[in-house]
Amino acid sequence: MPKIEVNESAFFALASGKPEAGHAPWGIWGSRDRFEEALTCAKAELDEPGDEGLPAGERTMKIELNDTNRPDLWGTSGCARQLRRYHGGPECRYPFFSSPGAPQKAGLKVQVEGSVRGVRPFLAGFVASGATITDASLRDLIQTQEKLAWNFGRKRRSLSMGLYRRTHIKWPVIYRGSDPQTAAFVPLQWETLGDKPEKLTLSEILVRHPKGREYAFILENEAVHPLLTDSAGEILSYPPIINSADSGAVQVGDTDIFVELTGTDIHMVSLAASIVACDLADNGFTVEPVEVEYAFDTPLGRNIVYPFYFQEPVVCSLSQVERLLGEKLSAEDCVRALARMGVKAEPTDRAERGRPEGQAEPGILAWPPEYRNDFLHAADIVEDIMIGRGLGSFAPESPREPTVGRLAPLTLFGRKVKELFVGMGYQEMVYNYLGSRRHLADNMRSGGERIIRIANPMTENYEYLRDSVIASLVASEAVSAHAMYPHMIFEVGKVAFLDPAENSGTATGHWAGFLHADREAGFNTAASQLQTLFYHLSCPYLAEEADDPRFIEGRAARLIHKGRPVGIFGELHPEVLTNWGITVPCVAGEFDLEELM
């Protein structure tokens, strides 16, 4: 979960709306217990208090956020804003937003050329001025930049943020694609050659600069790379890798900054820009809009004035509120509760999303705040109503159907399998259920027809759900050549795979897998161990020849229980072993525990 570090004085001043509260112990709450209770409205908890040996203005608190759907909370201003509204602070107003129904004009422009459309097409930006960047606000701004780019933006792959001194820029700014072999500039935090700074091409930055090497995976295979320049041709940055040293890094004392965000999803980029703009406005900055002109069509249009409000209102019926919360609330109750969460709402008779107009009933219409886009369903509105009203306001209720907690039969059966494997000399392993296509399919000589791909993976190593336990076991064997043989490992865990017969198109199974690596390991080794295992499980089975590309032809068998296939075992194919760099024979197998029960 995201964890943020906040300056104690700045946080308490913002959270209460009273500057003097920044110097009082625990702000307006007066005690640690009351403050920790107050944090629950942001689904947050105090991870580490500030050092009481330091002056109030120098203390740093650590706060852990338990909601990954609220990136607006991942900074001092955003988290403090939620506490301020919840505890009766004034309504937050951000008049600088443009929207489809109320467009604004902007004197400053960014031109997005068609050359970036295929690599990193979207950009949002604005200018903030009128206040002074302090050490605390700069640290928080950099933290927000890092949290948004790393957590929300998947390590800068789909979102990154740049900060610039406005005085170094000649408008309009131009966002274009460039040849990585010829475009060159002096990147920020780069050594110089004698008295003359050394320029690096974009390709060289990915190889030689620390930040380039860290984020090379985003652009190294692209023929065109994005570049941000001003109208005089001066390079501002190489998104999402590094700023130019010539544009100057934002420093303490600056009063006029340009903020830009680039990425691959225009709604994500727009929301991140809104979050940063609201944070700076809460810190006393005046936000000046910037018009972004696209050379191509986007889901939000060709000309967008940022910050831009693009969110759609959501309807939630009162019957939905009663069904999920177990208590009947009026529309006015819901509106008041949502106001404490910073959400504007009003009574309505419109139908919920996905329902025909003929099914309209009394409810509420809620508009997400400018800095939020997590209202995907009426249930999200109900959650905010619950938090806004206060969990302690609901009367406790005994369960209507008391039950006795006990382990599920499948869990007990899985434990028995584990005990038997351990009794035969196997060592238990525990793995992540996500992996790469190379590990789950290519290295295993499989076509990967059944594996499920994640729509928004963090990295390629966590892009697919595993459909087999064997691949995980082989990955361990590949790094275990230093250990004395034989190697005998197993796991009892989940697998998932595509299955058209299921309503969701996917199925999840509880499987056991094993691997035995040794110079003398062969088909008979696995067959005898499975015979022992199934005997003690009281599960009769048959073995019939199987054709599976992971195993040597003629040395693999399918396990049949009550006329149905429940698993497979055999000698792993030499090509599989070569793909993984394994130099000893291996036998492996896996079977479905639910089918055996």
Image (cartoon, rainbow, N blue to C red):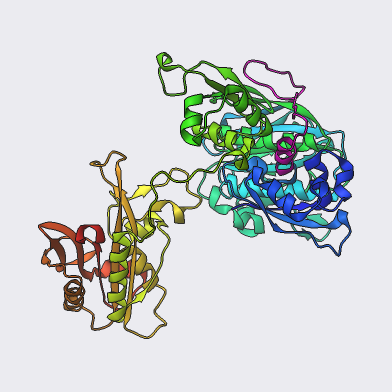
Q: Nearer the viewer, residue 5 or 119?
A: 5
- Residue drawn at (29%, 80%) of the image: 423
Give the quarter of the figure containing the C terminus.
bottom left
Picture coordinates of residue 528, whole percent (x, y)? 17, 78
| In this view, 91 is above or below 255 | above
Figure check: 575 above or below 248 = below
Q: Position of residue 64 (x, y in %)?
A: 65, 53
Left or right of 451 on screen, residue 170? right
Question: Within the magenta stretch, is there residue 81?
Answer: yes
Q: Residue 460: where, in percent of width, then height?
A: 46, 53
Please say whether residue 508 is one of the residues in the magenta stretch: no
Residue 186 visible, this orientation: no
Please identify the quarter of the rendering in which residue 79 is found.
top right
- The answer to whether residue 543 is visible is yes
Name the dominant secondary structure of the magenta segment.
loop
The residue sitting at 41% across, 64% down in the picture is: 431
Q: Which residues are magenta?
A: 79-108
Furthest residue in direction bottom, as rendered: 484
Q: Position of residue 71 (x, y in %)?
A: 62, 42
Q: Nearer the viewer, residue 593 or 309?
A: 593
- Residue at 54% x, 43% y: name it: 396
Q: Is residue 175 left or right of residue 134?
A: left
The single residue placed furthest to the top in the displayed view is 358
Q: Closer to the camera, 343 or 477?
A: 343
| Left or right of 302 in this view: 515 | left
Image quadrant assignment for residue 14: top right
